[in-house]
Amino acid sequence: MSSIQVTVDGQPTSIESGVDGFKLFTSKTVVALRVNGELRDLAHRPVEGDAIESVEIGSPDGLNILRHSSAHVLAQAVQNINPEAKLGIGPPITDGFYYDFDVETPFTPEDLRALEKEMDRIIRSGQRFVRRATSDEAARVELANEPYKLELIGLKGTDSVGDGAAEVGSGELTIYDNVNPHTGETVWKDLCRGPHLPNTRMIGNVYSLMRSAAAYWRGNEKNKQLQRIYGTAWPTKEELRSHLEQLEEAAKRDHRRLGAELDLFSFPEEVGSGLAVFHPKGGIIRKTMEDYSRQRHEEAGYDFVYSPHVTKSHLFETSGHLQWYAEGMYPPLQMDEERDENGEIRKQGQDYYLKPMNCPFHVLIYKSQGRSYRDLPLRMFEFGTVYRYEKSGVVHGLTRARGFTQDDAHLFVTQEDIEVELQNVLKFVLDLLRDYGLNDFYLELSTKEEGNPKFVGDDAIWKLATDTLEKVATESGLKLVPDPGGAAFYGPKISVQAKDAIGRTWQMSTIQLDFNLPERFDLEYTANDGTRRRPVMIHRALFGSIERFFGVLTEHYAGIFPPWLAPVQVVGIPVADEFNDYLGEVIEKLRASGVRASLDVSYDRFPKKIRNHTKDKVPFMLIAGGEDRDANAVSFRFRDGSQENAVPVAQAVERILKAIADKVQV
RNA sequence: GCCGACUUGGCGCAAUUGGUAGCGCACCGCACUUGUAAUGCGGGGGUUAGGGGUUCAAGUCCCCUAGUCGGCUCCA
């Protein structure tokens, strides 16, 4: 046996030639190799000079392999039960995998259970995943019954493969055979780049089919819809359990659920899809959010403006919305048209539109007078309610609504001031988000997609805008993630992504640079040399939409709002009626200081009152009985059940006021 | 918009093979007057999302509309 020189996990090592990954790594948790940067099956045999690393099942690559192999088992199970099912693609995704199938009838929950049974059988049989290189021609013959796979072969090496990249790469084509370990017989096969687990047993019973749904073939709504099955798979039972618990936790925090439970808002069917009404408790939270935002904007030198909800079509023609964005707008309201008895138009009508954006109005305010460089930067701020015709299938609670209020600002600046103003805006935005309790951010830079006609304006301007945004974003020190093609039609944007308490990220603020609207509206200012120049606009929404931000905060806090936001901040619960007056005085004292406090004088018994207000997530429950009254004190009970007895009244009041003023959580 | 599931009193749910709507919480009344998550008793409230059809009979079956949920596409 000759030996070869390789490096194994960074260490120069001499190994026998022809040795495969199974021999190199005997640990059961190693599922694949990384050879010179490329993922390989454990059956791969390294050659002289290779740099080899082990891939642990718990590593990101290892998890992908586990999940990808699980997807294969799912596909095999589907075809075992229904040989007519045609295969789409089946990649790993965050926390799991999916596989798309073309089947006559969609899968039912019962089907999923039957499929899990079949998958268990396949997994227990310990099939090996065996890689086999093939040619395009041979694969076409072998997969003649799999039209979607044939299509992928045709796309091989092109940019349009998209999610099919798990099936075909740019190199040689490979098929994975699932081989029965006892008979050596190939029981199933799939076009796939791999790598895969050595055998199905490694999947164990640590997977679960989650749901089925339709998905367009190759993600294009013009294509046929296939039936997709989603699953999750993990290396260990504990990880699967904790994943399922996390889903449960997320469900408990769902703002739609908490909104109903805490009586914050609702979506009356009578009003229409995606249109919320805020109830008193939600209303006070929202008002508090808005009031604080107003205060900060005032301090930061913004002007407050207001604009109507509807306007004549011409404004949106000038802005470009009707040309570029009509399908996202509510259909027009036809006004003032009159016809004679023959149906002939006697008086020409007008089309009015609900506004999808506030910017054109702010532009008109800018234009209402001649502007000087001395006026700039001009910062206009408005809680502007906009209406967008979201497709029926995408409406989702407060986070995707058809009517919502943007905390919208438009900054008119000179070219020279762009950078400084952007820096200030970004800092302002992040500071304010922190005050609302979000602390973990990264930035996304959304740029135009070359050649896509939806983006208006000339390339040089786009480049300047994009470069400036990138510079400012980079200087912020936050992580910057590119988002090609995600720009607004009139300009690139930075968006602030915030992580919530359970690690989910939400797009919050956006800052967009716009050279285009000033052009379309022919905006000008007089420079200090007397020449007329064109200002640049910065569009900036901080919460994105107040409704959406409200929803995000509700989920972030799981409904347990910090005192400054809590709809009811203090409830006084007397131990018995006898103490109503005593505790009532304390509550009055708090109310006089602006605290949202009330006294529970209902006929409920004491423990029931505690239960009620705990369920309502009131931050401070103040309790008073004989002992407290004698000591001129009250007792605190907090939402987590902890308590603090005999706190002198003056101290208690001060403590509550301070918690509210400091915007801290309790 | 597309695919699928779902819609029963304010909320959460139940109702054998189609046989004519129940429960808990909440609400109202009465009694109890209580030291840290549910006091007891009584009461009111639904033409089962809306409309149409099949049937002797529809919450249960079929069709249309609206809404909700999960995905897909979309999110300027």
Image (tube, coloured by chain):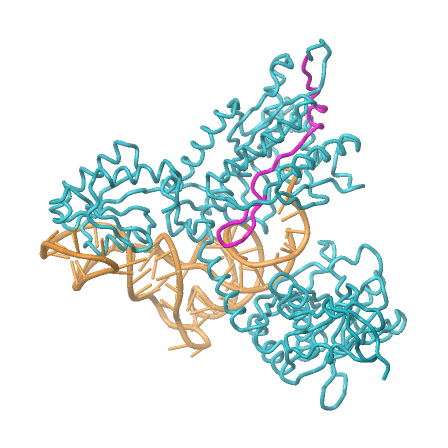
Taking the view exactly as shown, the residue that stands out farthest to the top is A530
Instruction: Tell me if B28 is positioned left or right of A417 in this view.
Output: left
Whole-percent x, y for residue A564 in the image = 37, 39
Q: Residue A84 appears at what percent x and percent y?
A: 72, 75
Q: Quadrant of residue A18?
A: bottom right
Q: Could one spot residue A598 in this view of the protein?
A: yes
What residue do we see at 67% from left, 15% from top?
A: A525
The front one of A548 and A35 is A35
A414 or A617: nearer the eye?
A: A414
Tally of numbered tags: 0
Q: Is residue A86 visible?
A: no
Quadrant including the N terminus of chain A = bottom right
Chain letter, colour cyan: A
Assess whether residue A512 is covered by the magenta stretch.
yes
Q: Residue at x 42, y 51 (%)?
A: A258
**Relative image position of residue A375 (x, y in whole percent):** 60, 15
* Residue nearer the viewer, A137 or A412: A412
Magenta span includes A663: no
Q: In the image, what residue occupies the spot 50% across and 31% down?
A: A383
x, y percentage for residue A229? 63, 67
Q: Classify residue A63 by image quadrant.
A: bottom right
Above or below: residue A411 compared with residue A47 = above
Instruction: Please determine whether, in this image, residue A92 is positioned above or below residue A131.
Output: above
Q: Chain B, which colour?
A: orange
Residues drawn in magenta: A497-526
Q: Residue furthest bottom?
A: A183
